[in-house]
Amino acid sequence: MSVEATVLVTIGMAAVGMALAAEGAAPPKPAGKIPVILDTDIGGDIDDTWALALILKCPELDLKMVVSDTGDTVYRAKIAAKLLEVAGRTDVPVAIGLRQKPMGTPQGPWVADYDLARYPGKVHQDGVAALVDLIMSSPQPLTLICIGPVPNIKAALDKQPEIARRARFVGMHGSVRKGYNGGPTPQAEYNVKQDPKACQAAFTAPWPVVITPLDTCGIVRLKGDKYRRVAESADPIARAVIENYRIWWRAHNPNKPEKIDASSTLYDTVAVYLAFSTELLNMERLPIRVTDDGFTREDPAGKPVDCALSWKNLGAFEDFLVERLTGGR
């Protein structure tokens, strides 16, 4: 990260700290790692797996907990726990979010024989309570990286509204001026459309909100040599990501020969990056309203949201992903 980006993040966290201190919360430390909680629907689209791997490869971030969200949250927690084991990070607690109707398990073969009860670290059965307790007991503000629908977050805000005075929200949500695959028309993005009421609660809570909508995250893919570097890496975390990607790919392409030469769209990795830097992105503060049908509309009555609307250098971000995930191996 450049000096400029470091200054921007430090100023941003300091501003959050001053605001939270006014509410009685401890301000963040002026330097060091940013403490984060990942709220994820890992095990659905494969990009969540890439995103968790990226967090584990970012020295700027201090991962405090992974909370599974939406659908079969036990299945999702298994994937997170096994990846944390591969990474040697069983110091990170895994929390099981609200249990809902299962929505498919495309990465199921990777955890078919995985026993969550044998995870060496802590497993919280009530993920919402664990999230609230962690935020309220933290000596400094926490950053929530939310990369799926957010029913856990709505439930946490309902349980303890004060968490919004002690945290900030960084999410992969919405579509402001562009749609999927860079299309010119905004669309109802999945993470919002799946549970608009939950997203409304998250976006209107009194914490800072930063998002990567489809405008920026919807065009991130690794192709050619960049993909091959990750696919052929000896790094154990990168190998686990690619193993999961192949399982996921086969689940969606059961009748096709396996010939993979690029990643799928890596939406969620951009939210991870935004947790500590905006250097490669053009940000704009916009009043955003989440509609009942899952759109994120610019609306003068909406709450100000910091939106990553375009790339300064997408190629540099792709290079960043490759270097972090492979560790040069």
Image (spheres, helix red, strand yellow):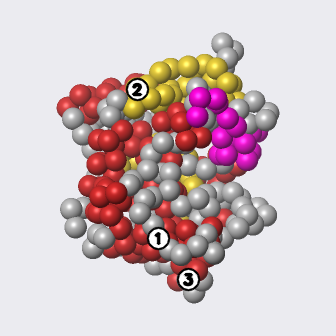
Question: What residue does disc 1 label?
Answer: 259
Is 266 within the magenta? no
User: Quadrant of the image for the N terminus?
Assistant: top left
Task: Decide if residue 166 is on the left or right side of residue 14.
Answer: right
Who is closer to the viewer here, 149 or 266? 266
Q: Residues within 10 Å of mark 3 (few under 14, many from 20)?
A: some
Three-letter code, disc 3? Tyr
Question: What residue does disc 3 label?
Answer: 114
- Reading the chain from its start, which is encountered first: label 3 or label 2? 3
Vertical comparison of 270 with 310: above or below:
below
Q: Which residues are magenta?
A: 183-204
Q: Residue at x 43, y 50 (%)?
A: 221
Q: Which mark is residue 237?
A: none
User: Quadrant of the image for the C terminus?
Assistant: bottom left
Image spot of residue 122 (x, y percent): 51, 70
Q: Residue at x 37, y 72 (%)?
A: 239
Q: Give SS at disc 1.
A: loop
Three-letter code, disc 2? Asn
Q: Give SS at disc 2.
A: strand
Question: What residue does disc 2 label?
Answer: 282
